[in-house]
Image (cartoon, rainbow, N blue to C red):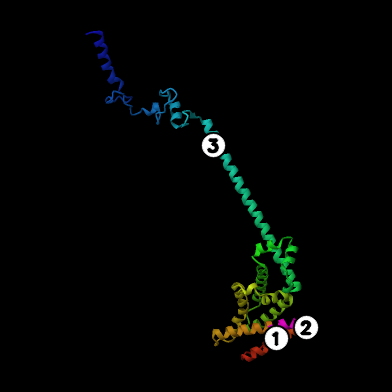
């Protein structure tokens, strides 16, 4: 046999041995003549079989192969190193911190603006309340309020919609304070409760006459209807005379009781309002208190209820 034939035979005998894996199992040759990858070929080439695009040859060594398999490949062909990724992540973190700082600053600025707006609103209401309390509703002028608050008339309108909004805010606070005072009257004895409600209303009216008058005297601009919430608050105050009347007149129906409570409250209000009107028929507070008690005596007697104080 010639030298060429011997060489070919030796190559054919060596080829199966080259295909034996580390486990000792021989694999069939690739149909196209290329040696197939073994079961553990990933240990050498890495999971992604990373290739250095600059040289087109497999990377050597498990450490480098592992690094390249997990690396990020740039479009230009070069790998981003771990240091590059570290600094890129740092830049992202710094950007996030910057954005968070901006958001925090915006929240703080909005909070400060909100606090300033609330302070101005409270200041305007306080000034309006002071003018009404001292001089009456007719003396209240939007320009006076704006000047005292150190702002423009437009700012007052921006805060409350219109000047009615200022007056209504004061009136709401007035009826809330009145109702809170009336709710503090003891309820153990229904007859004494009725006297107590009348006396408490007199005391509140004497202390805040102009504010309470504003509640009943104010008329909305352009004949707009009075806000329902304030009307309901006034009715709730009147209704505080309802429970003691129910206890005193258990056989009366609800409609009659409701009418009686409104009539009694309205009568007490009228007597006090006229009695405290200095321009006409003012009555000294002590005498006015006696008049109120006598009226309640007569009203209860007319209902068949024995008055007692």
- Which label is found at residue 293? 1
Query: Residue 108's spot in the image, x, y percent?
Result: 64, 51
Give the percent coordinates (x, y) of residue 207. 74, 75
Mark closest to the chain's N terminus, 2 or 1: 2
Residue 182: percent from the left, percent from the top? 66, 76
Counting residues from the N terminus, which is met first, the one under dot 3 or under dot 2?
3
Q: What label sits on residue 284 in the rendered view?
A: 2
Q: How many angstroms separate mark 2 from mark 1 (CA)?
A: 14 Å
Q: Which of marks 2 and 1 is in front?
A: 2
Q: What element carries label 2?
A: loop
Q: Nearer the viewer, residue 299 or 221?
A: 221
Q: Is residue 99 visible to the viewer in this orientation of the structure?
A: yes
Image quadrant occupied by the C terminus: bottom right
Q: Dot 3: within a 10 Å radius of its alpha carbon, few (fewer than 14), some, or many (20 or more) residues?
A: few
| Residue farthest to the left, as pictured | 1
Q: Main secondary structure of the magenta part?
A: helix
Circle 1 SS class = helix
Q: Is residue 180 above or below residue 99?
A: below
Total numbered labels placed on residues in the image? 3
Asked whether the beta carbons under mark 2 and mark 1 sit within 8 Å of each other, the answer is no
- Place residue 259 in its image quadrant: bottom right
Q: Distance between the residues labelled 3 and 2?
A: 83 Å
Up the image or down, 191 lies above or below 66; here it is below
In this rendering, does residue 27 appear at all? no
């Amino acid at each position: 046999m010639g030298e060429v034939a011997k060489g070919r035979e030796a190559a054919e005998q060596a080829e199966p041995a080259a295909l034996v894996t580390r486990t000792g199992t021989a694999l069939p040759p690739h149909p196209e003549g290329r040696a197939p990858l073994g079961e553990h070929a990933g240990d050498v080439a890495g999971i992604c079989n990373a290739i250095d695009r600059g040289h087109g040859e497999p990377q050597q060594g498990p450490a480098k192969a592992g690094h390249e398999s997990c690396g990020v490949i740039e479009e230009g062909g070069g790998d981003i190193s771990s240091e590059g990724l570290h600094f890129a992540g740092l830049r992202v973190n710094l950007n996030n911190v910057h954005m968070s700082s901006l958001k925090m600053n915006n929240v703080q600025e909005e909070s400060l603006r909100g606090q300033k707006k609330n302070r101005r609103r409270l200041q305007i209401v306080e000034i309006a309340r002071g003018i009404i309390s001292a001089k009456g509703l007719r003396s209240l002028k939007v320009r006076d309020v704006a000047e005292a608050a150190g702002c423009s008339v437009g700012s007052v309108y921006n805060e409350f919609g219109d000047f009615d909004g200022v007056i209504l805010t004061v009136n709401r606070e007035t009826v809330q304070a009145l109702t809170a005072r009336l709710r503090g009257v003891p309820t153990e004895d229904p007859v004494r409760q009725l006297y107590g409600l009348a006396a408490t209303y007199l005391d509140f009216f004497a202390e805040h006459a102009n504010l309470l008058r504003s509640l009943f005297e104010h008329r909305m601009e352009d004949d707009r209807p009075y806000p329902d919430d304030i009307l309901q608050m006034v009715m709730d105050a009147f209704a505080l005379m309802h429970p003691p009347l129910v206890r005193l007149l258990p056989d009366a129906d609800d409609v009659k009781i409701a009418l009686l409570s409104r009539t009694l409250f309205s009568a007490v209000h009228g007597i006090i309002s006229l009695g405290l009107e200095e321009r006409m028929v003012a009555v000294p507070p002590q005498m006015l208190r006696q008049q109120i008690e006598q009226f309640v005596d007569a009203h209860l007697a007319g209902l068949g209820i024995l008055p007692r104080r």
